[in-house]
Amino acid sequence: MVMPFWSKKELDVKELALRAIKQLDPDVIEDTIQIKKMQKVWDRYDMFGLYETPDSIYEFAISITEKGKTYRLHKNLLSPKKIRKEFEDKLRRGKEGEQKK
């Protein structure tokens, strides 16, 4: 029998994290939330990850209890999507130019 990566309790914690992120940024796109690191310390979960809004990409850090009390809730802007798209387009054009030579 293969055990799921997330246990039921951890899924509940992910839902609590989603609620906390929505308090911080109501424009969050739910499908884009990525939890990069999660660790349990006593009765508290510490999480770090990424999420997107329609305009930008952010990283977040949350410290939350199983009951839903938030101890830490931070977000940092990584990049606006428009600038990131322009940068990726320039990289693609540069690689295409190298391949033609």
Image (cartoon, grey):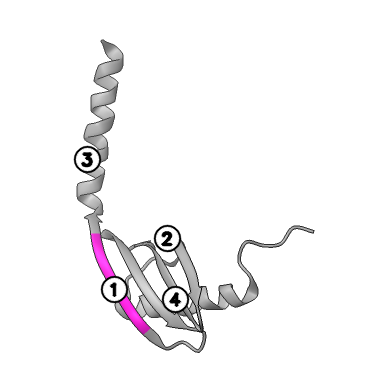
Q: Badge 2 is on which residue?
A: 32
**Which numbered marker is on residue 17?**
4
Query: Along the polypeptide, which appears first: circle 4 or circle 1?
Result: 4
Q: CA distance from mark 4 to mark 3?
A: 31 Å
Quick one: label 4, few (<14), some, or many (20+) residues within 10 Å?
A: many
Dot in front, 2 or 4:
4
Q: Is mark 4 in CB contact (under 8 Å) with mark 3?
A: no
Where disc 1 sits, the SS reads strand
* Residue drawn at (31%, 16%) of the image: 99
Identified by mark 4, the residue type is Ala
**In percent of the image, x 33 and y 67: which residue is there?**
60
Using the rendered view, name the quadrant where residue 22 is placed: bottom left
What amino acid is found at the position of numbered circle 2 in the picture?
Thr
Asked if the residue under mark 3 is in contact with the one under mark 1, i.e. CB atoms within 8 Å, the reply is: no
Q: Does 101 sit left or right of 7 as displayed? A: left
Q: Please tell me how crowded label 1 is: few (under 14), some (14-19), or many (20+) other residues with Cα within 10 Å.
A: few
- Is 72 part of what is drawn in magenta? yes
